[in-house]
Image (cartoon, rainbow, N blue to C red):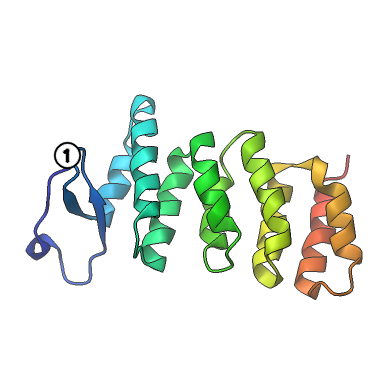
Amino acid sequence: PGSVAGDDFPVGSQVVVHRNDRGEIVITPAERVREQVLDSLPADRERIEGRLLDALRLAGITDAGRAFVCQMLALVAGPRSVPVLAALLKDPKSAEDARYALQPVTGPEADAALRDALGSLSGPAKAGLIGTIALRGDTTVRAVLAGIQANPSEAPVVRDAAARALDHLKA
């Protein structure tokens, strides 16, 4: 994508700041980025995934920017995205975004990242993580979920999520 001047954006539009293939800083309307991701051919998804991961690594990325990039990653992410998303998953501030991006990623790496983050979160963030683990059908986590459900020091929302997940994961 080419560089777009700030004057080209309607008032209130969202933009994505990233680097192009030549290393130049580019400002692109978020809707255009969304269209590029949605319209991408399977052969282009790995390149797009790499650009989105680069955007997540940018210093100063805003919360809204991170959320947008994770939404786009949910459409193209593969195992390569897991380490970057796993780091975000352990921070309550970014866990929801990372969880959203990881949920559709197939493979044991994503399951392991979700399981590993259980000890890093609490409250609603942990409850959401438990829900994602259940939706993915990760039965290896049953014993951990049973321990969470029985732990009186866990928040009620977390214990309830563990109970629902265990019910969902019944053999």
Q: Quadrant of the C terminus?
A: top right
**Relative to residue 131, is residue 139 drawn left or right?**
right
Is 16 above or below relative to 83?
A: below
Disc 1 target residue: 22
x then y, percent, for residue 24: 16, 47
Answer yes or no: is residue 78 visible: no
Answer with left or right where residue 123 lies relative to residue 43.
right
Which residue sits furthest top? 43
In the image, residue 131 lies at what x, y percent?
70, 56
Where is residue 150? Give x, y as percent. 92, 65
Quadrant of residue 147 within the rendered picture: bottom right
Residue at (88% x, 50% y) in the render: 143
Can residue 171 be spotted in the picture? Answer: yes
Label 1 crowd (10 A; few <14 / some 14-19 / many >=20): few
Residue in view at x 27 percent, y 56 percent: 30
What residue is rendered at 80% in x and 74% in y? 156
Three-letter residue code for mark 1: Arg
Q: In the displayed structure, does residue 76 sit left or right of residue 117?
A: left
Residue closer to the observer: 63 or 60: 60
- Which type of secondary structure does the marked residue at label 1 adopt? loop
